[in-house]
Image (cartoon, helix red, strand yellow):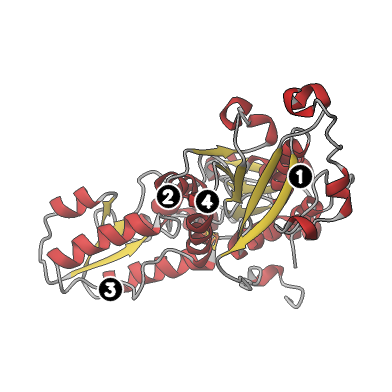
Amino acid sequence: MLPEVGRAMVCSVEPPAWVPVLTAPESRPKSSLLAVPALPVWGDSVPDRLMNVKPKLKIVLCSPRGFCAGVVRAIDTVERALTLYGAPVYVRHEIVHNRYVVDSLRAKGAIFVEELAEIPDDTTAPVVFSAHGVPKSVPADAQRRNFFSLDATCPLVTKVHREAAIHFKRGHEILLIGHSHHPEVVGTVGQLPAGAVTLIETAEDAEKFAPKDADNLAFVTQTTLSIDDTAEIVAVLKQRFPNIHGPHKEDICYATTNRQLAVKKVAPVVDALIVVGAPNSSNSQRLREVAEREGCKVSVLAQRAGDLDWSMFEGIKSLGITAGASAPEVIVEEIMDAFAARYELEVETVSAAEENEFFPLPRSLRPDAA
Ligand code: SF4
């Protein structure tokens, strides 16, 4: 089931100002062809803007893009809690890193806090933990204060927590490849006693790391990293410590992987690429970096159409668009509409993978819960 936020997002009141068309000119819908007026005899020498003719722009949409199964589940958790228990529903940290989603849920009665200390002691309202996961101390604190907590941690993040716990039980020294201060990293480190996990952020960190016992190491990774950067770090670790334990592939999730693969296909063939996403969204930032590395000269992150610096797109003939795993499709549509107001668009989609993942709600919110 799509979250209500998601459902609202895909329904435009107005029909979109752009029309998906096939690349072959003869197969374009009539409406697109009719939008181009016949050139007058002096047409070649008259600037387009004086003739009110929009320049052409090819938009290449990356697929998959936008919401992943973990984000849908997290948003659904808050919406279902609001439906079942009414407002307010407390949410620790942004449920997912997207301002539009957070504002939409806030308007429905969610109250976002950074720490449980901000929640009144006497509340009976549900308290939701965000998709990024939390240190063990957080649910323990919620239980001590008798809060009714709902865990919206993505199951793929929980899987990493379990891997780390198993390595710890087996007595391995644990390395976590990830970005310091990201809430997912804080949550994973917080699954184990202080000092049990060493953070590795770069290949240089991996080169410098001095283990207690080189034959008793294990690693886990953040789920939203760059595939290439992580492969480089893992290669350094494996070369230095051939007996290191780790997942078969890294712990980078399917959604992060697929969105990066789609950008790798699109970035080399477009003049600019927009990633719809927030600056604090790790997977969105990585998509922007991937586009840059693939040679795309203009690669920008945008939360809304209003954020776009139009001077960056002057003279482009083609534009790639993708969206981070926490960015709703309605913002992609908003940005397409903004370009359609300035250009005559031709739209095609380039796909890197099919996605059918679905994660069920926390047990106590499922329709069949007692
Ligand atoms: S990006 Fe990956 S790990 Fe994060 S919520 Fe989505 S599926 Fe889960």
**Residue 242 spot, x, y in % from top left:** 15, 72
Q: Earlier in the sequence, mark 1 or mark 3?
A: 1
Identify the amino acid type marked 4: Val
Where is mark 1, residue-wise? 109
Mark 1–mark 4 Cα distance, whole angstroms, equals 44 Å
Q: Nearer the viewer, residue 336 or 56?
A: 56
Q: Nearer the viewer, mark 1 or mark 2?
A: 2
Identify the amino acid type marked 2: Glu
**Residue 302 spot, x, y in % from top left:** 60, 37
Q: Secondary structure at mark 2?
A: loop
Where is mark 4, residue-wise? 269
Q: Earlier in the sequence, mark 4 or mark 2?
A: 4
Residue drawn at x 11%, y 55% as measured from the top left: 210
Identify the amino acid type marked 1: Gly
Q: Is mark 1 within 8 Å of ligand 1?
A: no
State the mark number for residue 169.
3
Q: Secondary structure at mark 3?
A: helix
Res 176 → quadrant? bottom left
Q: Earlier in the sequence, mark 3 or mark 2?
A: 3
State the mark number for residue 294.
2
Identify the amino acid type marked 3: Lys
Q: Earlier in the sequence, mark 4 or mark 3?
A: 3
Q: Is mark 2 within 8 Å of ligand 1?
A: no
Q: Could you tell whether 291 is left or right of 56 in the image?
A: left
